[in-house]
């Protein structure tokens, strides 16, 4: 055997035999974890679906375990108890986030509400968001907008229904949630159901940016290699963001011009107010340090955080219901009872639909849009006696918690009924179900997400029955996942809408 090979094998042997006895210092020892290879550590054990790989490891190494990802130490949390420790007891130390290298494009990681560490600026951005777009008053005020977008979706589905054709639900649902956000922010549709439209450029850039940002990157694991941008992802993210910022700038310029003209011609006329208006107002207040650049980063965050999460959750819900026709019939009879014949679903009907709410929760339990919540420790922390060292990447595996058989009866079954029997919410207090996270970095878009998902699902289930394309039987539906910035269905759902039968006689 050659000398270099012996040397390599010796290193490998030392690493493998010492892998389980992790560093023990005065600060405590790291949680246990799988054996690791020299240099790369556990990177190659993560595979294409890291949430599944680490869930499998946690069965052996426990609800808190550690991994080495190149130069980085990662800690994975996989039970309600350890999640509570991480997100509540140690909320302050674990409120920062780790991010993938492409998010450094345009210094997005230094301006984004999603990615910057807790600071006065982060608090300001969060307050701005919860007082404008996501305030209860604004969510009520834009109710008509959600209704209009849902009506458009129903009318598109109706065309497929009349032709007896399958509709690509993934796309249709994405366009709907995209346009709800783009109208709330900018008062325009930025996506269309027609695939040859020019507005596709913007939409494509957002979709592509999400794809690139969700992929693991060599520069994340080996920071000294970052400057090389080996996979070219940061370069591509820069091109996407450049394109998106150009569009945002056009909207900002047009709105500023309109304001000047309006001041001159109709000084007493109240203009239509959308979020862009509220954000522009903020930049003009002397006491704030909110700039035009901040507006562009915030718009970008909202398109990325608020569209795909919602649409892919709805796609999972429809897929589960098509796979379980008896649950779909149950949901439809609840909705059709409440709405009656020839009606239209209104938001005021939603609180009268407990089974629909249970469907949304059950979908988020099995298919959380963000399966691994990314956090970062800003100081050493002890959880269950183990050390989570400063600067460790911390991942809360929401996906594994939702499928844990010690927490849920028949965890792999889609059983919305469980939420009719058990009082459990998704607002970050019940740690067995935290698809929106918990604590001060919890998702601020939860109400908006629930309103959109409930309205869209109720309307699709009220107006149509659903079946799969020729030859596909529900039991054989492909339910595999693709991991990215959000957890997608690998094979987009295509389903045939059927006109709803005449209902209950008066
Ligand atoms: C089904 C839909 C959604 C899911 C499952 C979801 C999930 C999440 C999760 C898990 C986090 C991280 C929470 C944590 O660290 O504890 C998050 C953060 C965030 N979400 Fe959502 N989200 C959804 C919809 C939305 C919508 C509609 C918006 C806004 C329009 C939104 C805006 C945000 C923002 C701005 C953050 C970052 C908050 C911060 O870091 O301070 N999300 N979301």
Image: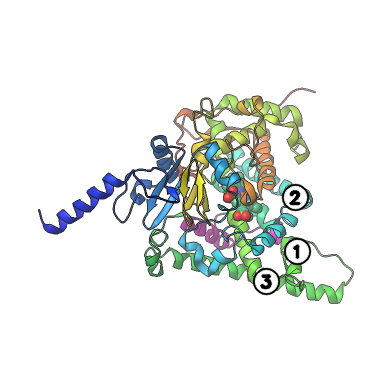
**Residue under the point 45% across and 36% down:** 478
Badge 2 crowding class, 10 Å Cα cut-off, few under 14, some 14 to 19, many 20 or more, is some
**Residue position for label 2:** 139
Estimate the spatial distance between the alpha carbons at disc 3 and disc 2, rounded to whole Å: 25 Å
| First to last magenta residue range | 184-213
Left or right of 13 on screen, residue 461: right
Front position in the image: 91 or 387: 387
Q: Is residue 20 magenta?
A: no
Estimate the spatial distance between the alpha carbons at disc 1 and disc 2, rounded to whole Å: 14 Å
Contact (CB < 8 A) between labels 1 and 2? no
Q: Is 466 placed above or below 308 here? A: above
How far from the left and from the top, in percent, is residue 79?
51, 37
Left or right of 468 on screen, residue 295: right
**Residue position for label 3:** 291
Estimate the spatial distance between the alpha carbons at disc 3 and disc 1, rounded to whole Å: 13 Å
Q: Quadrant of the C terminus?
A: top right
**Residue under the point 56% across and 66% down:** 110
The numbered mark, 3 or 2, whose residue comes first in the sequence reads: 2
**To which quarter of the image does residue 490 belong?**
top left
Residue 278 marker: 1
**Residue under the point 59% across and 66% down:** 111
How far from the left and from the top, in percent, is residue 45?
35, 46
Instruction: Confirm whether residue 407 shows in the render.
Output: yes
**To which quarter of the image does residue 355 belong?**
top right
């Amino acid at each position: 055997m050659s000398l270099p090979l012996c040397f390599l094998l010796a290193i490998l042997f030392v690493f493998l035999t010492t892998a389980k006895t992790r560093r023990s210092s005065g600060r405590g020892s790291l949680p246990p974890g799988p054996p690791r290879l020299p240099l790369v550590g556990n990177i190659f054990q993560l595979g294409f679906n890291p949430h599944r790989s680490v869930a499998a490891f946690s069965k052996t190494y426990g609800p808190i375990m550690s991994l080495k990802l190149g130069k980085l130490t990662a800690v994975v949390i996989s039970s309600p108890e350890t999640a509570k420790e991480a997100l509540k007891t140690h909320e302050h130390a674990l409120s920062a986030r780790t991010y993938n290298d492409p998010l450094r494009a345009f210094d997005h990681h230094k301006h984004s509400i999603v990615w910057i560490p807790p600071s006065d600026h982060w608090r300001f951005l969060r307050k701005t968001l919860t007082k404008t777009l996501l305030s209860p008053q604004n969510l009520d005020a834009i109710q008509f907008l959600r209704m209009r977008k849902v009506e458009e979706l129903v009318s598109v589905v109706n065309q497929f229904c009349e032709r007896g054709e399958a509709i690509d639900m993934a796309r249709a649902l994405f366009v709907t949630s995209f346009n709800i956000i783009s109208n709330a922010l900018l008062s325009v549709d930025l996506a269309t159901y027609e695939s040859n439209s020019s507005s596709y450029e913007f939409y494509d850039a957002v979709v592509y940016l999400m794809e690139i940002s969700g992929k693991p990157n060599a520069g994340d694991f080996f920071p000294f290699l970052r400057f090389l941008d080996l996979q070219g992802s940061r370069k591509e993210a820069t091109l996407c963001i450049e394109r998106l910022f150009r569009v945002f700038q056009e909207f900002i310029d047009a709105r500023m011009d309109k304001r000047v003209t309006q001041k001159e011609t109709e000084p007493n006329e109240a203009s239509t107010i959308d979020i862009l208006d509220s954000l522009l107002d903020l930049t003009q207040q002397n006491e704030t340090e909110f700039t035009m650049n901040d507006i562009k980063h915030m718009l970008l965050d909202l398109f990325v955080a608020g569209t795909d999460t919602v649409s892919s959750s709805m796609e999972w819900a429809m897929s589960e219901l098509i796979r379980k026709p008896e649950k779909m019939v149950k949901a439809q009879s609840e909705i059709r009872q409440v709405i009656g014949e020839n009606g239209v679903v209104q938001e005021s009907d939603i609180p009268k639909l407990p089974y629909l709410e249970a469907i949304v929760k059950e979908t988020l339990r099995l298919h959380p849009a963000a399966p691994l919540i990314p956090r970062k420790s800003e100081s050493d922390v002890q959880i269950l006696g183990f050390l989570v060292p400063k600067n460790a990447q911390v991942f809360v595996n929401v996906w594994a918690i939702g499928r844990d058989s010690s927490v849920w009866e028949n965890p792999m079954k889609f059983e919305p009924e469980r939420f009719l029997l058990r009082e459990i919410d998704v607002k970050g207090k019940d740690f067995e179900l935290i698809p929106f996270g918990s604590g001060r970095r919890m998702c601020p878009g939860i109400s908006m997400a629930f309103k959109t998902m409930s309205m869209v699902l109720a309307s699709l289930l009220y107006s149509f029955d659903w079946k799969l394309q020729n030859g596909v039987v529900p039991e054989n539906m492909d339910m595999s996942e693709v991991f990215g910035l959000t957890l997608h269905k690998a094979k987009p759902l295509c389903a045939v809408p059927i006109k709803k039968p005449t209902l209950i006689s008066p």
